[in-house]
Amino acid sequence: MMATTKPVEEGKEYEVDIKELSRRGDGLAKIEGFVVFVPNAKPGDHVTIRVTQVRDRFAVAEKI
């Protein structure tokens, strides 16, 4: 089993600033350089999120 170097964990909560929109229109934040997509968020939002999925190159989270 490979050691994980991802700075986010499924189920954990983080406070983030939404910096830009993804091509699909989701808010895009970065945690230690790791991309997190946040649906229903827009650039300029400062939100608390809960990570719902962690993939190889990105994570998906929901606003809470």
Image (cartoon, rainbow, N blue to C red):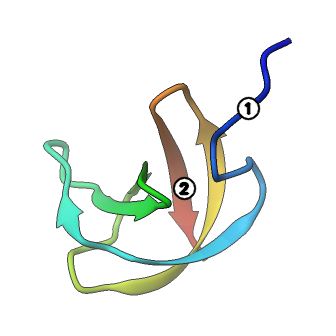
Residue 61, which numbered label? 2
Q: Quick check: 62 above or below 64?
A: above
Q: Label 2 neighbourhood size at 10 Å, few (<14), some (14-19), many (20+)? A: many
In screen coordinates, is 41 left or right of 7?
A: left
Looking at the rendered image, the quarter that the C terminus falls into is bottom right
Task: Name the residue at the right extreme.
Answer: 1
The image quarter containing residue 18 is bottom left
In screen coordinates, is 34 left or right of 8?
A: left
Q: Which amino acid type is marked by label 2?
A: Ala
Q: Disc 1 vs disc 2: Cβ atoms closer than 8 Å? A: no
- Residue 27: where, in percent of width, then height? 29, 62
Q: Quick check: 37 above or below 64?
A: above
In screen coordinates, is 26 left or right of 21?
A: right
- Residue 9: where, in percent of width, then height? 73, 49
- Residue 2: where, in percent of width, then height? 78, 16
In this view of the protein, which residue sits in the foreground, 58 or 11?
58
In this view of the protein, which residue sits in the foreground, 13 or 34?
34
Marks 1 and 2, how far apart in space? 18 Å
Q: Residue at x 20, y 50 (%)?
A: 22
In this view of the protein, which residue sits in the foreground, 5 or 59?
5
- Residue 7: where, in percent of width, then height? 64, 52
Q: Quick check: 16 above or below 36?
A: below
Q: Which amino acid type is marked by label 1?
A: Thr
Which residue is denoted by mark 1 in the rendering? 4
Which SS class for mark 2? strand
